[in-house]
Image (cartoon, rainbow, N blue to C red):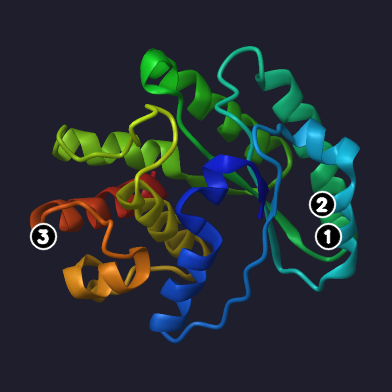
């Protein structure tokens, strides 16, 4: 995974690997993180490109900020640059669709459109986490997905992201992903949702992936 603190928060890569391990699916996850970085910053830094070249990856996930307006041209340009590099090393690119800050919640449509466009342009796998947030809130507006800074994800939001990743990579989500004991073994005790809300997160992930 190549990204910034939206990927790093709650250690999404490790969460996804725990989820795969718990369901007996083989998965190795690594991440190259630069706090506050766009894909252009990673490109200049060069470490992400080195890791792509050095590893025998199947999927390389690309993530930057919301990219609803001013960040969209950069997202499209560097998603294309990275996609060429990724395919040149035998892997497929994937776009981790994120979400706007709470203050810019009106921008969900444009963020979604930017990541859809980047995925379509590069025949990349789309990981529609931002759409899963909206699907969750359509079911229950009280599910806490924003951390106190109103931008980064809560453990529940990172677990939701892990469910979306899993669904897109491996297919149907196991029923166990909607069980509290199982979910806390993946996301930790900070998973602050009710049993009902946990089931709704699972439903939201499935809905977003089936669109």
Crowd rating for badge 2 (residues with CA inside 10 Å; few <14, some 14–19, many 20+): many
Residue 179 shows in this picture: no
- The residue pinned by badge 1 equals 52
Disc 2 to disc 1: CB gap under 8 Å:
yes
| Mark 3 → mark 2, Cα distance in angstroms | 38 Å
Sequence order check: which comes first, mark 3 or mark 2? Answer: 2
Disc 3 to disc 1: CB gap under 8 Å:
no
Q: Is residue 90 above or below residue 182?
A: above
Which circle, 2 or 1, is nearer the viewer?
A: 2
Image quarter where the C terminus lies is: top left
Tag count: 3
Of 166 and 148, nearer the camera is: 148
| Mark 2 → mark 1, Cα distance in angstroms | 6 Å
The residue sitting at 35% across, 42% down in the picture is 132
Give residue 195's mark: 3
The residue sitting at 75% across, 37% down in the picture is 79
Residue 66 shows in this picture: yes
- The residue pinned by badge 2 equals 48
On the image, which quarter does residue 59 sit in?
A: bottom right
Residue 135 % position (x, y): 27, 39
As helix, strand or loop, the secondary structure at mark 3 comes to helix
The residue sitting at 50% across, 57% down in the picture is 12
């Amino acid at each position: 995974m190549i990204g910034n603190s939206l990927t790093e928060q709650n250690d999404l890569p490790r969460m996804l690997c725990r989820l795969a391990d718990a369901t007996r699916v083989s998965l190795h996850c690594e991440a190259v993180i630069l706090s506050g970085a766009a894909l252009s910053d990673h490109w200049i830094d060069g470490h992400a490109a080195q890791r792509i070249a050095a590893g025998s990856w199947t999927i390389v996930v690309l993530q930057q900020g919301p990219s609803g307006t001013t960040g969209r041209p950069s997202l499209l340009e560097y998603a294309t640059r990275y996609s060429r590099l990724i395919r040149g090393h035998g892997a497929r690119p994937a776009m981790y669709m994120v979400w706007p800050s709470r203050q810019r919640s009106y921008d969900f449509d444009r963020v979604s459109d930017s990541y859809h466009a980047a995925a379509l342009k590069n025949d990349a796998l789309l990981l529609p986490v931002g759409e899963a947030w909206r699907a969750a809130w359509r079911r229950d507006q009280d599910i806490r997905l924003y951390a106190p800074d109103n931008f980064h994800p809560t453990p529940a939001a990172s677990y939701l992201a892990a469910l979306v990743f899993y669904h897109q990579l491996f297919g149907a989500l196991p029923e166990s992903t909607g069980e509290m004991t199982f979910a806390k073994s993946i996301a930790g005790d900070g998973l602050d949702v009710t049993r009902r809300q946990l089931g709704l997160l699972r439903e939201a992930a499935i809905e977003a992936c089936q669109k």
